[in-house]
Amino acid sequence: MEKTVPQHLQNHRGFARAFRPGRLTLGIISPFMGYADSPFPDMSDFTALVKQADNSGLGALWVRDVPFYDPNFGDAGQMYDITATLGYLAALTEHITIGSAGYVSPLREPILTAKEAASVDQMSGGRFVLGLAGGDRPSEYPAFAKEFDNRAERFQENWQTIRRLTEQSFPCFDTAHGGRFYGNLDLTPKPTQSRLPMMTVGRARQDLRWIANESDGWLWYSADLPHLKKLLAELDALNESGIWRPFGTCNFVELLEDADAPLQVFNGIYLRGGHKAIADFYAQQQEIGVSHIVANLKPTRRPPLETMQDFLENIVSQFDAGK
């Protein structure tokens, strides 16, 4: 049975650009540059990179939620706060989708996440996609006075809280881990459409059936084609709603200067090669049904503006999301 795209998602500028049935689009994750030899990127080219991306066929710019630097992980993300960065991107860009990949939901107050998400969606003219993650850095949980072991339960509860606050007026409901809503308060602003696009980023310790039927899409970490093909088939079998829910992958990319450098894949998630081999590999993912690929350029050692130009002109141009 052919699955449909709900009208509120068809009408949402951000979702419609980043996710198109039967077509692959590409995204890039903050800070949109390589910084292979340090946990901390040099952000001096950040604005120029964003402007390059906005005027291209790139589908989306994704921003990470990394509140602390943990030496065990060796990556501080874009360093800037996720919501402040999303607001900056909303003001700086005109065309491209901006998304969170993702807010670490169990660490965050869902009321404020809902407020921030609806605000960015409004300020960007309906170009924001809210991605929520479960969090994979145990060291952060004590600092937030949050339990690590019940994060899956709180992820679902926060998801539903955000849904209700952004879709209903003066909602009345109770939560197990959060607050109680008596119907006397209304969250404003609401998103640009009746329903804000919400993606699961990573597994978030959720059952695949829940992801296949509750999330508007899923971003997963893999570049293993047989695994992805099997996963897509499983998701399709579990989808009981008849709604098309895009599946995307996230991977590290070391984009070499030699355009003819062959592709190497490490640990099922790390790609190294020239733009010809990487574009060909992306085309293979499109053939098996992957809808969106998010590239993390951290391993690339070339200058940021040069890397972005190569990526946009020689890879993204083959999977143009349009304006």
Image: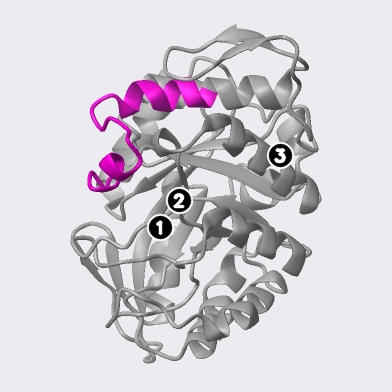
Q: CA distance from mark 3 to mark 2?
A: 34 Å
Residue type, label 1: Gln
Q: Is residue 190 visible?
A: yes
Residue type, label 3: Ala
Please name the residue shown 36% across and 20% down the image: 153
Mark 2 falls on what kind of element?
helix
Front residue of 152/211: it is 152
Could you say where residue 201 lies in the image, as x and y percent from the top left?
43, 42
Mark 3 falls on what kind of element?
helix
N-terminal label among 3 and 2 = 3
The colour scheme used to paint the residues is one colour
Disc 3: which residue: 118
Please name the residue shown 50% across and 72% down the image: 32
Tell me where the magenta segment starts and ends, as one range: 136-159
Q: Are marks 3 and 1 in contact (CB under 8 Å)?
A: no
Residue 5's label in the rendered image is: none
Residue 284's label in the rendered image is: 1
Please name the residue shown 71% across and 35% down the image: 9
Front residue of 4/96: it is 96
Residue 287's label in the rendered image is: 2
